Amino acid sequence: MKDLDFEAMRKKMVEEQLIPRGISEKRVLESFNKVPRHEFVPKELWQSAYNDYPLPIGGGQTISQPYMVALMTESLKLKGDERILEVGTGSGYQAAILAKLAKEVYSIERFQDLADTAKKALDSLGYKNVKIKVGDGTLGWEEFAPYDGIIVTAGAPGIPESLVNQLKDNGRLVIPIGGSGFGQVMTIVEKTGHAIRTSEICGCMFVPLIGKEGWDR
């Protein structure tokens, strides 16, 4: 692994996977150039860490395709002073990207081992503005609500009411909505007062969102 040039691999990922697909926000692109994605996957997968597809991270979970992470991140339209909730910590990579772009990141993971591994990776890389807990992400994290933005990294049967309730006025929720299989539609939920407006971005494939306001186990 010593001969892998991770900086060059990140640059190639941004130039060949993100920019050609329309990711254009400067701060988002800079974060993808800086965050070491390989540190969030098993060492035996380092050579594939920046490739254009998801990778397994254990427990039947995956680290999402770089473009999908970028698309969801850019959809939040972050300026730098936001408080963000992530549902589904997984590897911790999405949280690391968000930590570069927002003031505070709160992330919920269903599996203790994944939460521990993600926290270890984030701590080792010096991310101080990310908090992780183990729990039912469909119920959100009431203690630190409301949130300027919420990202859900698993496919839901509908929009969890608890997450909408924890979203600030004019906040944005990015969530895959669809069947209990692996086919969903990436959806943006915008909250204005008591009104909720949704818009669809694209088709996507995520593991199912398990929880009280998601799919049954």
Image (cartoon, rainbow, N blue to C red):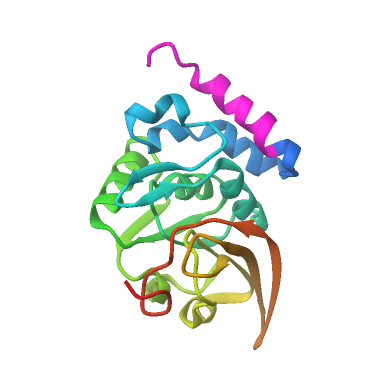
Residue beneath the point at 33% across and 41% down: 123
Question: Is residue 93 among the parts visible in the rendering?
Answer: yes
Q: Looking at the picture, does residue 43 appear above or below residue 201?
A: above
Q: Quadrant of residue 43?
A: top left
Main SS of the magenta part reads helix
Q: Looking at the picture, does residue 85 appear above or below residue 158?
A: above
Residue beneath the point at 65% across and 38% down: 29
Left or right? Give the position of 61 relative to 37.
left
Q: How many marks?
A: 0
Q: Looking at the picture, does residue 164 appear above or below residue 38?
A: below
Q: Is residue 101 magenta?
A: no
Question: The magenta stretch spans which residues?
Answer: 1-18
If the image is split into quadrants, where does the C terminus sit?
bottom left
Residue beneath the point at 39% across and 30% down: 45
Q: Nearer the viewer, residue 144 or 7?
A: 7
Residue 192 percent location from the top left of the image: 68, 80
Q: Looking at the picture, does residue 49 appear above or below residue 134?
A: above
Q: Is residue 3 magenta?
A: yes
Residue beneath the point at 46% across and 80% down: 162
